[in-house]
Amino acid sequence: MPLDPQAQAYLDQRAALNAPPLQHLTPTVVRQGMRAQLALLGEPAAVARSEDRTIPGPDGAIPIRLYWPDGSGPFPILVFFHGGGWVIGDLETHDALCRNLTNGAGCLVVSVDYRLAPEAKFPAAPHDCYAATVWVAAHAAELQGTATRIAVGGDSAGGNLAAVVAHMARDAGGPPLVFQLLIYPATDFTAENASRSDNAQGYGLGSADMEWFGGHYLNHPAEGTHPLASPHLAADVQGLPPALVITAEFDPLRDEGEAYGRRLQAAGVSVTISHYPGMIHGFLSLDTLLDQGRAGIAESCAALRAAFGA
């Protein structure tokens, strides 16, 4: 179908800013720009309580932000990893999305501010994210959570990291995970497919942007074949937690996300692949502008509630 009119209006607003191409900017400048756009999206939803902490990581402290829903618990837990190509994004850029997931799924959300590239290149991010997941499981009770109902999730690069952490947890014998929420995830650095070529430019995230992100994240291109970078290339995907994979029609990552979901299904993993026609990369974070952004959040929350209930 054609591009959704609401998505087109958003892209037109972005184009009117006449910002220089991403590849002409430094990570510091792009990070500042991503934060500056938050004001356009309105005030985030209120949650019962939120708190910033730091926890031990493999190479120093990891900042986290905790969000509690209404109630007394113990709550199921979603460990969330933000998107941003492993280079940009932080606790603030995904604050609104985490609040919506907290309220909609009725769970404790732990947002992880993992180390970013190029200051900390691959595999710093997956190591931080797995360490944070282990910490959350060990401290679930004191957080009003339950260690037997933990999911991982994230969008874009964060979806990549959630998938990778699911592999790491399976291979290390824990912590046990009940679900993975993979929102337009990057799954294969080596992918060559129609969505990458058809959506190479004009829809927000383009092929040149993806090269910029990958160039900052990986120490050298050959690392893209490592399963901690490309979970789709892992030798074995059996025994992973059930998943919801959300994709967008006009997203260069569409085909690799759906291919990963099909590979999980073929290995006996319970997976729902949910394709949003007319949508662009990042649409769940644009819920105040896009009807389908709100629908994607609602679907994510319903899937989490079902997984936690089981």
Image (cartoon, rainbow, N blue to C red):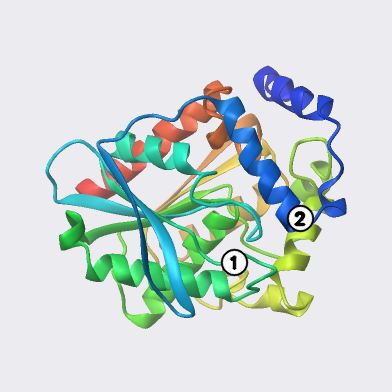
Q: Secondary structure at mark 2?
A: helix
Q: Is residue 308 above or below residue 250?
A: below
Residue at which label 2 appears: 210
| Mark 2 or mark 1, earlier in chain | 2
Q: Examine the image and state in which quarter residue 175 appears.
A: bottom left
Q: Residue at x 35, y 42 (%)?
A: 303
Q: Position of residue 56 (x, y in %)?
A: 37, 74
Q: Kindly identify the residue that appears in the image at 82 percent across and 35 percent down.
A: 202
Q: Residues within 10 Å of mark 1 (few under 14, many from 20)?
A: many
The image shows residue 73 at horizontal and vertical percentages of 14, 47
Residue at the spot 83% in from the left edge and 45% down from the top edge: 200
Which three-letter amino acid code belongs to the residue tagged 2? Met
Query: Relative to residue 17, is residue 264 drawn left or right?
Result: left
Q: Looking at the rendered structure, which numbered label has been put on residue 232?
A: 1
Amino acid type shown at disc 1: His
Image quadrant holding the N terminus, namely top right
Measured from the top left, where is residue 250 in percent x and y? 71, 37
